Image (cartoon, grey):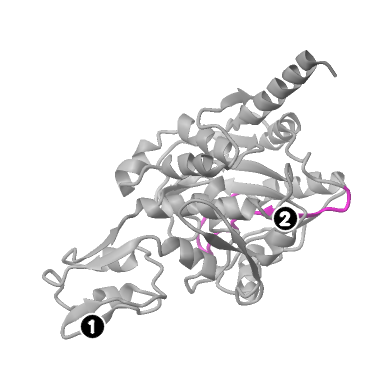
Amino acid sequence: MSGSELSYLSLTVLLMTMTVYFTPWDTGYNLMDEASVLYEEAGTFDCVGEGDLVAIKLHVGELGNPYYIPPFFVRQIIGAVKSKGGKPFLTDSSTYYQAHRSNAVDHWENAELNGYGGAPFIPADGLRSESFRTVKTKGILDEIEVSGAIAEADAMIVVSHCKGHALTGFGGAIKNLAMGCTPCTGKLRQHRTVGLEIDGGRCVGCGACRNACALQLPEIVNRKAVNTSELCMRCPACRDACPTGAIQLVNMPALSMALASAAYGVLSTFKKDKVSYVSFAKDIVQFCDCLPNPGHRVMDDIGIYASDSAVSIDAAFLNMADYKKFNDAYGVDCMLQVKEAKKIGVRGELKPKVEEI
């Protein structure tokens, strides 16, 4: 092959990796048909080889939350993986907080109640979040735990729901990798990059923080709240419950940077070109799918994205959406996790070409 041919090939590969494919959420069309064309153009299932064990990583939605990816779209993805000779399984990791998805049995039941089927649902981190592999990573974290079923899979389709998030501003593909593909220890490691401070001068010792905490971690000592527990995941429950504003989360941008670190570690367990991404910008609500009460829809439905890059697919959504609504609401730059992921070596572009299908 000549030098000019090599240069042309290199440019072609670069352009492919910079492109995110997109179909608008237009219910005047059959959106399953539109999605099928989208996946074909994007090469979504090119990562699947004959006999591959393929993780379809999704969030099944906390029980009671009506805003999650419609199960029929996930069944369509399952069928496409099977047509490529892959062996698909649905998967997600258990939650750190105690709700309907904090162990494998309840998580599987939650997935079934929310309508997911067509392939086995295999909780990624074992019965009680004990199954994982610790790997080195880059960025703000030195290492991260990767859920066992993710680390052992041959390929992965990351199916994400774009929405707001109280601590990182936004949740998409990078967060799906970082939190969704790590066990409870990995989730805690990421969340603990954020600090928590209690102003003793403002605290009145009412105990509202302790009552709001699922683990009842803040203690009331000498009529003042104290939280020194290493089990605290820095969720905003105690802060939001405090009637005097005595509790504050500090260095919140660190969590967005931790998402990038964790995502890098998760991707390191896969061979090159074995992970693909599909994101649904539909029912874009205030808060994460982790909550049974996700808040109000804050943006119009946008569409479906497909890419081979977590950085590019998240950037494409943020560039098209009015994401400053999230920035203003939560005081965190939504683009930080995307910029940090690219900075530490996750492939993709901050301003990818978006090709509408």
Does residue 43 lie above or below 213 as drawn?
above
Along the horizontal axis of the image, is 256 left or right of 242? Answer: right
User: In the rendered image of this protein, does residue 250 appear above or below residue 12?
Assistant: below
Q: CA distance from mark 1 to mark 2?
A: 45 Å
Query: Which region shows up in magenta?
Result: 50-69
Q: Residues within 10 Å of mark 2 (few under 14, many from 20)?
A: many
Q: Could you tell me residue 273's position as x and y percent? A: 73, 41
Residue 66 lies in the magenta-colored region: yes
Looking at this view, name the residue that lies furthest to the left: 201
Q: Residue 17 versus residue 237: which sits nearer the camera?
A: 17
- Residue drawn at (49%, 53%) of the image: 259
Q: Residue furthest bottom?
A: 222
Which is nearer the N-term, disc 1 or disc 2?
Answer: 2
Under circle 1, the secondary element is strand
Residue 292 visible in the snapshot: no
Pinpoint residue 150: horizontal percent, then vertical percent: 68, 60
Residue underneath mark 2: 55
Q: Position of residue 54 (x, y in %)?
A: 77, 54
| Location of mark 1 (residue) | 220
Q: Residue 127: horizontal and vertical position, in percent?
A: 65, 76
